[in-house]
Image (cartoon, rainbow, N blue to C red):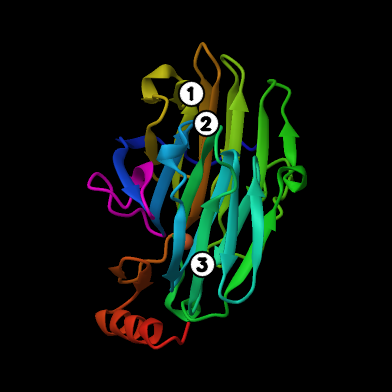
Amino acid sequence: MSETGNIRRLEGVVPGQATSDGAGVSLTRYIGSHFLSELDPFLLLDFFESDDPDDYIAGFPSHPHRGFETVTYLLAGKMRHGDNAGHSGVIETGGIQWMTAGRGIVHSEMPEQEDGRLAGFQLWVNLPASDKLCEPAYHEYPAAQIPAERHSSGGTVRVITGTTSAGTTGPVSGVVTRPLYLDVELPAGAIFEEMIPAQHSAFVFAIEGDVQFGESDGDGTLRSRELGILGEGERVMIHAGSTGARFLLVAARALHEPVARYGPFVMNTRSEIEQAIRDFNSGRF
Ligand code: FE2
């Protein structure tokens, strides 16, 4: 591990906002909420977790997207996905689906279970103007195809996309914002370090346990089920609290473009949103 580069501090802690979406799925929103409207290029982050089917069984029936990417990562359970181009599949525990909606897609995302635990994330990643109307595309990988890097500290890093300092590359490739998406598990007291390009926005989501930042405890602590925004710098140093920790570390290149947003359409201008609504209503997705 290189010791060069400034450490990214914990710049802000964002609580979740309880809400529901789709046909009535209970979830907690961390980006795209009253607390944090966006973190360029991230437009939305939802966390859902329940063993009560009433919280999830209604799912997300047929709905459109245009202009960005939707990323589903399941911690537990199964979700069935199908779209108007004939693509379908089931995402299972530990699996990732990185869907580039591009010019437009109409899809459904429904639980493939009637009981038991369903838990996971949906992240929306913006596309630059040059790519907003690209052809829709998918990257889908089950848990078995996501490499797990084992550290001497006892930590495990599942690499969904991007390349770690140790050279592990995740299966999701070719994404325009050059994201890093890591699922990190650390035993009590273990330290994790990683490089993140300086021009990337970055956040950490604490799934379990407390996550402590920097070289000492004084650099900030993120509690379980909080989202932490990382400040400027080139590397991150995190250590687990006394009970160990599991967290997501996600980063991607900021776009610095105007954002015009209307529900499932995210474009650069108001007129492009109006065009998206016209195209969807006249069946051109
Ligand atoms: Fe969707």
Which residue is at 49% across, 30% downward?
Answer: 51
Cβ atoms at labels 2 and 3 below 8 Å apart: no
Kind of residue at disc 2 = Met
Can you identify the residue that label 2 sits on? 237
Furthest residue toward right:
144
Q: For residue 32, which numbered disc appears in the image? A: none
- The local crowd at label 3, few if under 14, some if 14 to 19, many if 20 or more residues have their Cα within 10 Å, is many
Kind of residue at disc 1 = Glu
Beta carbon of the mark 3 residue lies under 8 A of ligand 1: yes
Q: Is residue 274 left or right of residue 285?
A: left
Kind of residue at disc 3 = His
Can you identify the residue that label 1 sits on? 215
Q: For residue 107, which numbered disc appears in the image? A: 3
Badge 2 or badge 3: first in the primary sequence: 3
Whole-number angstrom distance, CA of label 1 to CA of label 2: 7 Å
Residue closest to the eye, 234 or 191: 191
Whole-number angstrom distance, CA of label 2 to CA of label 3: 39 Å
